[in-house]
Amino acid sequence: MARSTTQPTARRADARRNIEAILDAAAISLSRDAEASIAEIAQAAGVGRVTLYGHFSSRAELIDAVVARAIQEGDAALDALDLSGDARGALVRLIERSWLALVQIGSLVTAAESALSPERMHELHERPASRVERLVQRGQAEGVFRTDLPTSWLVGTLHRVMHGAAAEIESGRLAHDDAASVIAATVLAAYTPPGVAVPPADTWARS
Amino acid sequence: MARSTTQPTARRADARRNIEAILDAAAISLSRDAEASIAEIAQAAGVGRVTLYGHFSSRAELIDAVVARAIQEGDAALDALDLSGDARGALVRLIERSWLALVQIGSLVTAAESALSPERMHELHERPASRVERLVQRGQAEGVFRTDLPTSWLVGTLHRVMHGAAAEIESGRLAHDDAASVIAATVLAAYTPPGVAVPPADTWARS
């Protein structure tokens, strides 16, 4: 009887360890090379391909799990951020911290964009997007962000400008160190109500 | 001797007709459904799959050819546009006409984004992008567009905001008829120099 209760538990613990090892290996491999293969990831995780496929039935499913975890971790870091005060300053702080999270996952972004559907990407970004949404709504209510465009559009614009910066860096058209301030300057201007002066880019920048 | 000179010519004419039929069918199929299969496209073109693969060795290669042709056609339409006068007004006209071209190709955009690499997409957009680039440079020289961000970044921002609008429409978050003015309002603001008031969105709008 001891056997039948211990073994499944041990198997579950094994499985959990394997899944963690696979997710860790995939996160590292895909952050360095968006086209890292299942074989490479399995090898880095120290498991066989059969074991890997036992947990993730396709490359897309694995990427999905890695991205979900990366977003969750990035989101936890953003929870610690002080977003009080002028909404424009809070936006710049949120951009700087989000950009850091995006840099850490490297080419995983590219892997995600080619393996996951736009709808799934949207779903995975729901929590971080809702934080941006609350901030945009607050800025709109306080009159510092424009209200002539839908909140969802302004939120999406931040997301796209940020991912655009990653693509520009990858193709050598944007310097890594300039990215956060370029993103902030662009989004701050895009959010400015018509008739109001665009705030100087470095008013709220930390650096 | 007549046979050996006529037949290759006839075969070449046949091949050209088949290629045109395949490109036309692919353009229509993919503009309606980004996931249209090779089998569906071959059927719509009235050729066999073997014939299709004889001309395009993969789905990506076919999509590449369709996108290249669509961009070329859109680009020809933009050549007719008057981009003189205030660079901000010219930008709005360019956005309105480019958006029309983008709407016409429908979900082909989605197909292109999932089948072609970011680098290839960049390459295909070189001519239309250089038109935007000249306009942005002129606006920067005339002081109506910001110079604190690189020209290439401003050009890329227009491209991404426009493609973002297509994605927002597809997922039901943006109304079709609002898109051109939302894009124009966003890009005009993003291009405004710090310290200068964002122009009211409808100053230069046609509609």
Image (cartoon, coloured by chain):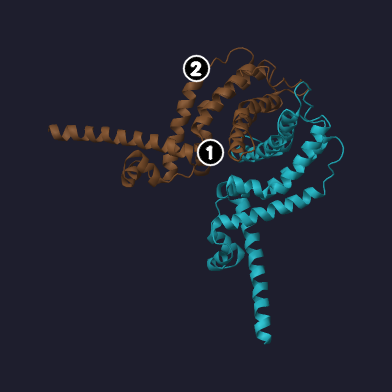
Chain colours: A cyan, B brown
Location of residue B89 with respect to A86 vertically, above or below? above
In the rendered image, residue B36, in percent from the top left (x then y), is placed at: 45, 44
In the image, taking residue A70 as reference, residue A76 lies left or right, namely right
Tell me, yes or no, if residue B65 can be seen here: no
Residue at image point 64% right, 46% down: A122
Choose between A6 and A182: the one closer to the eye: A6
Q: For residue B80, which numbered disc appears in the image?
A: 2
Query: A46 or A117, which is in the foreground?
Result: A117
Q: How packed is label 2: few (under 14 Cα within 10 Å), some, or many (20 or more)? A: few
Q: For mark 1, name the chain.
A: B
Q: Position of residue B188 (x, y in %)?
A: 68, 24
Please, what is the three-letter code of the amino acid marked with disc 2? Answer: Ala
Q: Is residue B12 left or right of residue A181?
A: left
In terms of secondary structure, where does tag 2 sit?
Answer: loop
Disc 2 to disc 1: CB gap under 8 Å = no
Label 1 neighbour load within 10 Å: few <14, some 14-19, many 20+: few
Please give the residue where the numbered disc 1 appears in the rendered image.
Answer: B119
Q: Above or below — where is B39 with respect to B184? A: below
Residue mark closest to the camera, 2 vs 1: 2
Which residue is more in the foreground, B157 or B23? B23
**Drawn side of residue B4 relative to residue A146, left or right:** left
Picture residue at 59% right of the left edge, 46% below the top: A110
